[in-house]
Amino acid sequence: AVVSTQSGHYGREHKLNLRMLRCASRTFIRSIPVASRTLSVRSASRVLQAVTHHRSVVGKSKLVFQHVRMFSNYPDHYRIDMPALSPTMEAGTILSWSVSEGDELGEGDLLAQIETDKATMDFEAPEVGFLAKILVAAGTPDVKLGTPVCIIVENAEDIAKFADYVAVAEPVVAPEPAAPPPPPAAAAPVAAAPVAAAPAAAAPPPAAEPIPPAPGSRIMASPMARTLAARKGIDIATLQGSGPDGVIRAVDIDSAPVPAAAPAAAAVAPPPVVSPDGSFTEIPLTNMRKAIAKRLTQSKQEVPHYYLTVEIALEELLSVRSQLNKEATGHFKLSVTDFLIKASSKALLDVPEANSQWAETSIKQFHNTDISVAVATESGLITPIVFTANHKGLQEINSDMSALKDKAAQGKLQPHEFQGGTFTISNLGMMGIQHFTAVINPPQSCILAVGAPQKKLVPADNEKGFETQTVMNVSLSCDHRVVDGAVGAQWLAKFKEYIEKPLRLLL
C-alpha cells in the first residue's frame, strides 16, 4: 500500500512506502486505518518523525541499514551505511570487498574488511538478499560514518535496476527538538552472529550424498559456510556440499584443504608522492596514524605529566624465569614482560590510587587491574589489554600476551581487546633503549617505561669490593591530577620490591 500526501505548498505528490515503516512502532502503524490512502502533510510528518525517533533508538542497538524506497523508479532495497566498528571510530577505509555485485548474501556472510582507527575488522552482511551495488570502492580513505557503502536487494531480478544508482542525501525531517539525530550504526557482526550460526548448527541428514554444483548454477551454501570460506580463502565453487540438495555447510569448509595463507590486510593509504624537486616524499596518513597523533597530542596538552625513575636489580628475576622455563618443557616460555605485568598488577593493588582515572567531577578507582601493553605493528602503536591480571598467574598472562601479539601483528584485534585498560606498560628494552619516558595513554593515569637490562659494577661485601649486577631503569609517567608525587614513589617502591624478589609474584 502507498500513502500519498498532497499539498499545494509542495506543489507535487509525495509518496511514502508503508514497508519503510515496518521498523517503526507497531502500535503506531496499527493506528493507521487500513482503508486510508491519503494523509495530510501534518500526519505524514508525524509518521516520518516516528520513524526517525525509532531509528534513533534502534541505532543504539547496532542498526546498520535502512530499508527504503527513496524514488519510485527504484524497487525496495536495503542501504548499508559505514558502521561504527570501534567506540572512537569517526571514519573508515574499506580495504576489500569479500563479495561482488550480483552475489547472493546470507545474514552474517562476510561483506567487507574495514580499517578502523585501530584495527582491521570484518563487516558482516546485516540482511539476506543480493548485493546490487557497491557505492564505495575498496581503498577509498576516510569514509565517514553513516556514508552509504552498498545496496542490498531481496530479489535477484532487481539487481540490474541499480546499475546507475547514485547515493543521495536523505530528505531531512526534523524530529522533536529533544530527539538526537539518527546515530551512526554500530558493529553488525555482534548482532548478526547468532543468526548466521543457526544454519551451521542444524543436524545433518543421516545419509546425504555430496552433490557437486551444476556448471553455471547458483552455488548453494549456508551463511556460516560462506563466512568461514571467505575467512579461510577457500573458493566454495570448488567444493561439493554434503547438505540437502548439495548445500555447502560449515562442516564442508572445515574439512576442505586450506590454501596458502595470504598476507593479512594492512592499513591502506594512498601511495607516497615524491615532491616535484625530489627533495622529499609525502606519505599519506593511515587511520591508525591519525588516531595516534590525535590521542597523544591531547594527552600532552591536557594531562599534567611528571616522571619518576628508579633502577632495579634483575638477577633473581632472570634466575627464576630461567628455572620456570626449564620446568615448562616447551609448554610455555615466560618473558620478562610477563613478570612486569604481574608485578605492576600487584603493585596497583597495594597502591590503588595509581589504578585510577580522572573523570572531571570525580576520580574512578578500579578494583581490578587491566594492564595495557604497547605493541609496535607495521601500521603503528596499539595497546592490547591483559584483563584482570590480578586474578591470573604468569603462565596465563603469557598465554594472553602471545595471542594478543599475534592478533595485533595481523591487524585482527577486536575493539574490546585494546579499548580501556587501567595501566600501561611500554617496554623498549628489547630494542636496546636503556632509558626513556612515555606519554600517558588517556584516560589512564600512569604508564611505565621499561629500559633494557644492562651489566653494572656495584659495591659488594667481597674481596674485590664490587660485583657485576644486571639492572634496568624504569620510569613512571603520572597524571598529577590523580597521582601525587608521593603516591607515584610508593608505587615504584612496591614494583621494585616485586621485581627484585620475584618469588612473591607466585603467591
Image: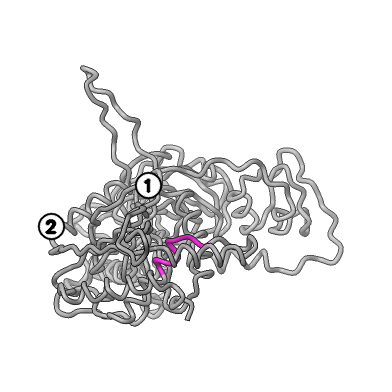
Question: Element type at marker 1?
Answer: helix
Q: Residues within 10 Å of mark 2 (few under 14, many from 20)?
A: few
Question: Element type at marker 2?
Answer: helix
Where is residue 389 drawn, in percent x and y? Answer: 43, 73
> Which disc number belongs to residue 431?
1
Kindly indicate the quadrant of the structure image that contains residue 242.
Answer: bottom right
Q: Amino acid at mark 1?
A: Met
Q: Height in image: 381 above or below 199?
A: above
The residue range painted magenta reads 334-341
Q: Nearer the viewer, residue 192 or 270?
A: 270
Q: How is the image coloured?
A: one colour
Drawn side of residue 284 relative to residue 253, left or right:
left
Query: Which residue is drawn at the image coordinates 34% and 34% (left, top)?
Result: 270
Q: Earlier in the sequence, mark 2 or mark 1?
A: 2
Drawn side of residue 334 relative to residue 139, left or right:
right
Q: Return the residue at label 2.
A: 301
